[in-house]
Image: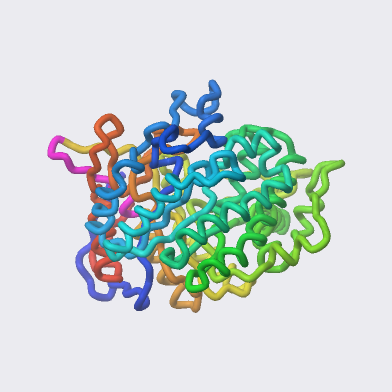
Amino acid sequence: MTITEQSPDQSNRLQFPANFIWGSATAAYQIEGAVNEDGRKPSIWDTFSRTPGKVLNGDTGDIACDHYHRYRSDVALMKQLNLGAYRFSIAWPRILPDGRGAINEKGLDFYDRLTDELLQAGIKPYATLYHWDLPQALEDQGGWTNRATAEAFVEYADIVSRRLGDRISSYTTFNEPWCSAVLGYGLGIHAPGLTDPALQVAATHHLLLAHGLAVPVIRRNAPQAEVGITLNLWSFDPASDSPADRQAAEEGYDLDNRVYLDPIFRGEYPQTYLNSLPDGVTVPVQPGDFEIMKTPVDFLGINYYIRHVRKAEPGVVGGEEVKLPGIYTTMDWEVYPPGLYDLLVRLNREYPLTKIYVTENGSSGEEAPDANGKVHDRLRHFYIQEHLVQSHRAIQEGVPLAGYFAWSLMDNYEWAWGYTRRFGIVYVDYSTQQRTIKDSGFWYAGVARDNALPDTRVTYP
């Protein structure tokens, strides 16, 4: 397959609304490195990555992209890319190495410096408080299966938001609680690597509870900043038009999407989820929890990569996944941009949303610099372009989409995949830490500069 360029055509130019946010995103453990410096103690990912067989090639985030030491040059790179915003996460074990108690001032100092550097470059800081790196000390006490961890998160959110205040434009409480609960406590393929349905259910509830508890605390400390949460959501399509397949797709949507959306926006869990719990497993709800969970947010962040296609299977709630012919990334994820449009429109129809961000969207690929030092990542260019086309389409239909953050700013530690998957619009040579802007990065910089998709498009036939 090859990608070909279409001829310039003014009718193809898609202008985005004024003040639309163009950004990129990263996560602390994936890029910072310096895991043993300046008072930081281990997170669950430090422990997990050192457990034999858990991460491909035994890779760890010990050095990653060395962003902890290179943040100034990385911010300069963001400015070169015309980014109006940078979405980064704060490492809890840098701030409270033991999860609670003594504050590590050197950890706060780092994010102070990063925030100021961004502001000086004219880039709005968008901070995520939790992107999966729970202090190991808290996991030793039960982690997210322990209700006390939700209370500890509020202490941490209070400390960070008091220190950084409203210099931060936007606070996200959690990134993808689905991954933390399901992959971490249910399937065991992410830290802390546990496989117990009851633990997964408890973790889900306490993550959502922690979110609701933290929102008013952050608002009090940073009244000019917006506060929200980011969920990884999928569109769901039936494998056929049969009633059974359509029901399977809807059940899948309930189990993966609504189980997080409904507590936040409706103060309840979907009945499909409650009916699907194994015998003897219950949600550890206490009086008042749902009121806390549905504390109003200023925005919803959406991380979208793929859709699901479901076929009914007797006795299986949500049916079975069907793989259709199409274009797939090196993660074996289907490239299906219309799914983002479908998801955005449905969310806007079903929930009282005043602002939405696409907080992650991107494609993995293993392209490396050629003999001339150029990185030609045409599929990533196509992927981002087509998802922006669908984003623009959703905006035209009234969806309050306010910004788009490409995942990711640079190649980095891809969790259980180690360093074998590259999502960046900037290439990183991990042996030298040299950064090289990819073709997709140069193209995205033009989109951010013009606040519009250019007339020339690429196709992937």
Answer yes or no: is residue 180 visible.
yes
Q: Residue at x 52, y 48 (%)?
A: 131
Residue 66 point in image, percent of width and height: 34, 38
Residue 291, image quadrant = bottom right
Name the residue nearer the viewer: 318 or 283.
283
- Which residues, given as a range, are shown in magenta? 371-382
Image quarter in which the N terminus is found: top left
Q: Is residue 97 above or below residue 362?
A: above
Question: Residue 218: x and y, percent?
Answer: 56, 64
The residue that appears at 54% across and 40% down in the rendered structure is 97
Can residue 378 be seen here? The reply is: no
Relative to the observer, which residue lies in front, 205 or 357? Answer: 205
Residue visible at 44% across and 32% down in the picture: 36
Q: Is residue 36 above or below residue 30?
A: above
The answer to which of 330 and 85 lies nearer the viewer is 85
Q: Position of residue 381 (x, y in %)?
A: 31, 53
Nearest the viewer among 43 and 284 is 43
The colouring scheme, among rainbow, by chain, secondary structure or one colour, is rainbow
Please identify the residue farthest to the left as the structure is shown. 372
